[in-house]
């Protein structure tokens, strides 16, 4: 954002006439100071806004101020929105679970050891308010580990079918909390994101498996879904029409 001033130009120059008001209340045309504020490539003449405010009452003042509001909110709607986060439970009671049993109890899922069976945990989250995501954090517990020495379960993590990272649990890792964090290129989901963890290897028969605790925690970060410019325009137009209606009633 930057503020700049341009000098007044005489009538007939490259500047355009602006609205002002005479002593007897009539509208007249003359030059006004040209102070510009620039936001994302859009310029707004602050000197013009100042003269609009000086117009006392009247349909013109309300209409012009409503027009300025439309421009401002549309410009603000074009500004990038980043740094937003969405949190939820994952794995959770609503997750789809593939394992030798699936839901062992209300607080445990498993047993996981087979890519051939399609062992996985997945869940779709809607209404996140995120137009795109580039950061995922997962926190949950490995509640049982009966893997033999040398055995391991390898997992890949997916966001909308995009592989964003992996994690591995071995027989010597025991049990306990696991914190995962992945950053990646923007994945566009328009507020809806499918999260999945899939087993990517086959543990030899009799070499053990692991289970996970429910619920865990998930945090997605990215950009917020922008409010369409048409909504800003519609809302501002309604405000202007209300002002005009009140004026006509008074007259």
Image (spheres, rainbow, N blue to C red):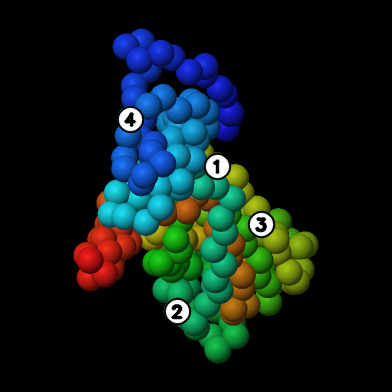
Q: Nearer the viewer, mark 3 or mark 4?
A: 4
Residue at (60%, 45%) from the top-left corner?
183
Q: Which residue is mark 4?
A: 29
Residue at (45%, 47%) from the top-left corner?
53
Judging from the image, what secondary structure is the residue with disc 4 in?
strand
Q: Which residue is mark 2?
A: 94
Q: Relative to 227, is 211 above or below?
A: below
Residue at (41%, 52%) from the top-left corner?
56
**Dot 2 alpha-carbon crowd within 10 angstroms: few under 14, some 14 to 19, many 20 or more:** few
Q: Nearer the viewer, mark 4 or mark 1?
A: 4
CA–CA distance in space, label 3 to label 2: 21 Å
Residue 82 placement (x, y as % from top left): 55, 47
Judging from the image, what secondary structure is the residue with disc 1 in?
strand
Q: Answer whether labels 3 and 1 touch (C-beta < 8 Å).
A: no
Q: Is residue 41 left or right of residue 14?
A: right
**Dot 3 alpha-carbon crowd within 10 angstroms: few under 14, some 14 to 19, many 20 or more:** some
Q: Is residue 209 left or right of residue 122?
A: right
Q: Relative to 4, is 188 above or below?
A: below
Q: Which residue is mark 3?
A: 180
Instruction: Answer with the quarter of the image where residue 94 lies.
Output: bottom left
């Amino acid at each position: 954002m930057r503020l700049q001033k341009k000098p007044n130009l005489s009538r007939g120059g490259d500047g355009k006439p602006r609205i002002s008001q005479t002593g007897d209340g009539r509208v007249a045309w003359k030059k006004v100071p040209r102070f510009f504020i620039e936001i994302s490539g859009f310029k707004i003449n602050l000197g013009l806004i100042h003269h609009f405010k000086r117009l006392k009452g009247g349909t013109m003042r309300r209409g012009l101020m409503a027009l300025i509001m439309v421009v401002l909110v549309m410009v603000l709607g074009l500004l990038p929105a980043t740094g937003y986060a969405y949190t939820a439970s994952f794995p959770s009671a609503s997750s789809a679970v593939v394992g030798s049993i699936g839901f062992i109890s209300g607080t445990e899922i498993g047993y996981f050891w087979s890519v051939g069976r399609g062992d996985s945990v997945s869940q779709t989250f809607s209404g996140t308010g995120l137009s795109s995501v580039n950061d995922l954090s997962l926190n949950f517990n490995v509640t049982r580990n009966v893997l033999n020495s040398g055995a391991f379960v390898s997992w890949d993590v997916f966001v909308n079918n995009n592989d964003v990272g992996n994690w591995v649990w071995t027989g010597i890792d025991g049990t306990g909390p696991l914190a995962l964090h992945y950053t990646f290129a923007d994945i566009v989901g328009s507020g809806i994101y499918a999260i999945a963890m899939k087993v990517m290897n086959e543990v030899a028969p009799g070499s053990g498996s692991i289970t996970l605790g429910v619920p865990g925690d998930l945090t997605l970060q990215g950009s917020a879904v922008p409010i369409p410019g048409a909504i800003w325009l519609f809302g501002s137009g309604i405000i202007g029409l209300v002002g005009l209606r009140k004026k006509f009633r008074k007259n």
